[in-house]
Image: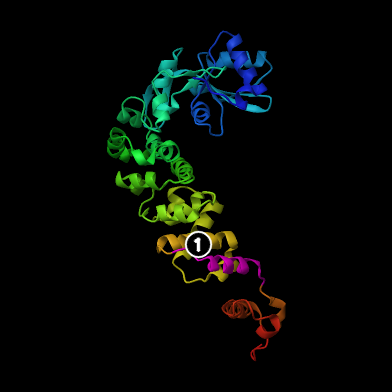
Amino acid sequence: MRITGAWLDHPGTRAVCRALTDGGHLALFVGGCVRDALLNRPIGDIDIATDARPDRVIDLARAAGIKAVPTGIDHGTVTLVAEGLGHEVTTFRRDVETDGRHAVVHFSTDVAEDAARRDFTMNALYATPEGEVVDPLGGLPDLRERRLRFVGDPAARIAEDYLRILRFFRFHAWYGDPDEGMDAEALAAIAEGADGIARLSKERIGHEMRKLLTAPDPAPSVAVMRQTGVLARVLPGSDDRALALLVHLEGDMQADPIRRMALLGGSEPDADLRLSRDDAKRLVILRTEIGEPTGPGELGYRHGYDAARDILLLRAAMFETPLDPTALTAAQAGAIVQFPVRAADLMPGFTGPALGQKLAELEDRWIASGFTLDRKALLAGGDL
């Protein structure tokens, strides 16, 4: 079997492979680029595995005029930049010691040893520079059947790196067959090893959860996370019961992990997942407004249309009601109106805190009128 794609013929990619093979070494595409090429999905990062040691990779690259950056040299990874395109080139490895997150590795010349240390069989697929698939562990049938399995003993793979628990659910959401369920042996090992999630940094947990919740339909995977006790460890106090309905209501909308996090809830999701300041602020707005009586027009006015639409989606999912098109129209209208009164209109009669309070009162009247009261009507009160 062969993979094809324009990325295989990119001049930079050809140059990197040629530098390694002309130096007498193997150059094998590995992991996501091979998996996604076999599935006819877009290719992201280009990873190359080789039997050349890192210092040899650097020497060969420089001799070929290719920029070499030792991005992870202790673990055998050198990034080669050719024709403006980066390639992560990593020496074949085998793990000799792990602490549940980081591994001590020894370099190898055996592709089978390199494959045996990977997480899932569908990620242990390689391809030559010509596109011929190399399958040391028999992972190709699993990929064809959309069957996610750990390489070897699931408990051993998890104990090597507890992040693989979250990766299992993320990869199932993106590549698994939801109608076939999940591998029972894997789920047993996950339930047994779930306490190891506490060893992971919140940043890494947040990174994996974002990728999981960006999948077209993460609901089946998240439901099993709950059943195995993983969801409670990642997002204490969260509830996924309305997630499937939210995905349905989203329709063809672009998947949004923050909107979906808002639905899951939890005690402190922004802290538990170490979100960026902007994402944390947006999450607070969405979560707060789900249960508030704020009307759709006011939502659009105060938060903009996109946030208002998301809040209306979340309310519909939470309360199991249809999404009202007229509410979306009202949110659109609210997003474009401007409050007609300015602070200068109330001065010098009002100053300081009294000025802010009066502006807020007038704004509330204006919103309650459906944005129909103009400046003259708002300023016509006898106390102005």
State which region is magenta: 322-338
Quarter of the image where one finds residue 347: bottom right
**In this view, 174 is above or below 19:** below
Q: Please state if 175 lies on the left or on the right of 67 as rendered.
A: left
Q: Is residue 243 left or right of residue 257?
A: left
Name the residue located 47 percent from the left edge and 72 percent from the top edge. Answer: 293
Q: Is residue 295 magenta?
A: no
Residue for badge 1: 311
Q: Position of residue 111 (x, y in %)?
A: 45, 16
The quarter of the picture where residue 114 lies is: top left
Determine whether the residue tagged by mark 1 lies in a helix, strand or loop. Answer: helix
The quadrant in which residue 198 appears is top left
In the picture as drawn, the residue positioned furthest to the top comes out as 24
- Residue type at tag 1: Ile
Find residue 280 and report its horizontal and vertical position in percent: 51, 54
Q: Of 79 and 26, which appears nearest the observer?
A: 26
The residue at 48%/45% (across/down) is 216
